[in-house]
Amino acid sequence: MNNIKWYYPVSLAELPLLLEKKGVVPHGGGTHLTSRDIGGIEGFICLKNLDLDYVKKDKNMIEIGAMCSYAGLVSKLKELSPDNLLIKSLQNAANTPCRNRITLGGSIGFIPTWSDLAGALLALDASLILAGKVSGEVKLSDYIAKKELQDQTLVCAVLVEDIKSVSAHYREVKTANDMPLFTVTVLLETDKNKIKSARVFVVGTTEHISELKELEAYLQGKDVPALDDADMQERVNVKIVGKRITDPEYMSYKAKIETARTVRKALRSFSAAEEAV
Amino acid sequence: MMNKILNVNGKALEVKISPDEHLLFTLRKSGFTEVKAGCKEGECGACIVLLNGKPVNSCLIFTASIDERDKLLTVKGIGDLHEPHVIQQAFVDSGAVQCGFCTPGIVLAAYALLNENPDPTETDVKKAMDGNLCRCTGYVKIVEAVLLAAKRLQNM
């Protein structure tokens, strides 16, 4: 018989003590935890009583509670911010029953290589509100880079700015609801026919998450008609993780092509919006 | 072991569970064998139940994370052999059931869809079924059945 303990805190004030306990981990939707070996886990902190399932918008800041599911977030954002990049990246992630359980906090806590979330949040320059050993607001990019921010802390909420932008998200999959081999996320700020700024991320690379700074520099200030696919592809230098079922060299080449296409797709959404006006 | 009270199909159910027990197993050992054990990794949808009205894979849920405030619905909670729900009858009439193993999950996915969207397109139906695998039918008759059920529900 296993001796896993369950804790059911009702306030954030209870968290630091629980997070300090050896082998005790937060439990949100549980989709990741239930499908893995939990041999080393001694306890779960059930987060359902902490009122962390919400999405709210104040001026141009969107705050998303960590217990918000992918499906819940997509549905709420469609009302609050219909063109939001997170809708594009999450609405096809996994499948319907999984999207109803996968939480934002859990996805950030684990950041799997197949994440549909990480690229979008990084492109949006998201911040996190943490509780536990480290508390307060930190940049997601810092959280990913610094292990000390992850240990004994809980992601309580995500903050993203509701910026005026055009965006697109691409998932490389074998079947529609498969885990992606890699994802490409593009966020562009545009002014008429010129790209003012660009953020481009590929997730699933040997570095796990790669920001394509060379491509971003190429895109910044560029007139849209002057964009060249070959030039864009040349600036995509990532290695996709080798997997048993695919060819990393081919996938890395495909990432070049799909990145250029995703930039074009983002710009098409901009043209469509302009036409609608 | 832990003692829990669950709310299944509108009735309280007292269960004794181990801390790492999955909801799928708890339901099946409690007699809800209409919840099918398929892949057990969230891919096939055979174990779908509705949790507070949303389809979820019971194989990916620890029972300890569920309590009596959560409303669980299995396919027998919407109708049975003697009093089938409109969706279940539409599946029979459309020939959308072959071996039947995936049917409980698919019917519940359809039930959740039609509660949210009473007039779905074929694309809406396919999207709502993206978490359900069927190895017999080829899906055509399943989609037809859901659209037929939608039509019948609208005319009620």
Image: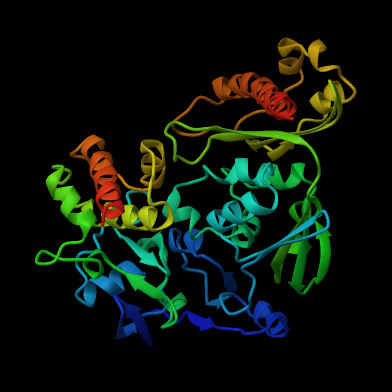
Residue A173 percent across, percent down from the top left:
49, 32
Q: Which one is in front, B143 or A145?
A: B143
Work out which residue is located at the far left of the displayed protein and give it: B82
Which quadrant would the C terminus of chain A be assigned to in this image?
Answer: top right
In the drawing, does residue A246 fall left or right of residue B81?
Answer: right
Residue A115 visible? The answer is no
Tell me: A51 left or right of B80: right
- Rendered position, B102 above or below A54: above
The image's colouring method is rainbow
Residue at horizontal 36%, vertical 43%? B125
Placement of the N terminus of chain A among the 4 image quadrants: bottom left
For image coordinates 90% across by 23% down, the residue present is A221
Q: Position of residue B111 (x, y in %)?
A: 32, 57
Q: Total marks drawn?
A: 0
Q: Position of residue A151 (x, y in %)?
A: 71, 67
Q: As displayed, is residue B93 above or below residue B19?
A: above
On screen, residue A97 above or below A212: below
For image coordinates 49% across by 60% down, the residue present is A101
Residue at image location 22% in from the left, 75% down from the top: B29
